[in-house]
Amino acid sequence: MIHNDESHAIAELQSLARRHPLKGADLEKAKSSMAILREAGYTNFEISNLTGGAWSEPTVKLYSRGAEVKDSSIKQAALNLLSELVAQGLSLNDVRLALFLKQDLDSAGLTPKDTSLLLSEAARVGLSLKPLVLLFEDIRKSLPVASIDDMADVTAYKVDLIRQGIGTEELQKLS
C-alpha cells in the first residue's frame, strides 16, 4: 500500500500539473512532491508519467536534484500488489471497475464492508440477490419511477396482507 506521504505527493503533483506552468509557492510544492517521490524510489521518468507529462523527465531531474532514494520498500509494495493482480488474472480494467464501485459506494455513504455484510446476510437467510436484481430491473422497465424504496414498501404491504390472511392467490385474483 502506498504510504500517506507518497499518496499525498502524487495527488498534489497531479493537481499542480493541471495548472502547469507554476510559479512561486506552487512551484515549490511541486518540487517538494517530486523530491518525496524520488526519495521513495520513483524514477524521474515515473514521476514525469505520474504528472501526465506536465513535467519532462529532465525537468523532474532538475527539480528533484539532491533527493536520494531513502526507502523504496513502499514503491516495491505497490509493484508487488500489481504483480499479485496479474497473477490472479485481473486487468487494469478490473482495477478501474473497483475504483468506480468504491466511488459509487462512497457517494452513498457506504463501504465495501457494508456491501459484503449485506451479501453475507442475504446468503445466510437463503436470499439470492440475482433474482432480486432482475425483479428490480423488470419493475424499473415497466414503471420508470420505481425505486428500491417502492420495492420495500410493496414488500411491507405484502407482509401486512399475509398477516391479515390475504395471500398470493387472493392478490392474483385482485390484480
Image: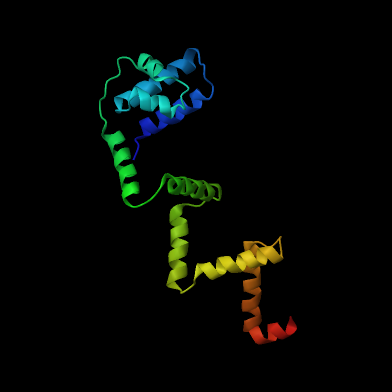
Q: Residue furthest right?
A: 174
Whether residue 62 is visible to the viewer of this picture, yes or no, is yes
Tell me which residue sits at (71%, 61%) in the image.
144
**Quadrant housing residue 56:** top left
Residue 64 in the image: state x and y as whole percent. Answer: 35, 17
How is the protein colored in the picture?
rainbow
160 shown above or below 67? below
Q: Residue at x 46, y 24 (%)?
A: 53
Q: Nearer the viewer, residue 4 or 142?
A: 142
Quarter holding the C terminus is bottom right
Q: Is residue 167 visible?
A: no
* Residue 90 locus on image (x, y percent): 38, 50
In which quarter of the view is residue 40 placed? Answer: top left
Check the image and report above or below for 37 versus 116.
above
Q: Position of residue 89 (x, y in %)?
A: 36, 52
Q: On the rendered structure, is 162 left or right of 43?
A: right
Q: Quadrant of the N terminus?
A: top left
Residue under the image location 55 percent in, 51 percent down = 108
- Coordinates of residue 87 in the picture (x, y in percent): 31, 50
Image position of 16 (left or right of 156): left
Count of picture labels: 0
Residue depicted at x 53% and y 25%? 18
Q: Quadrant of residue 46?
A: top left
Left or right placement of residue 118 versus residue 87 in this view: right
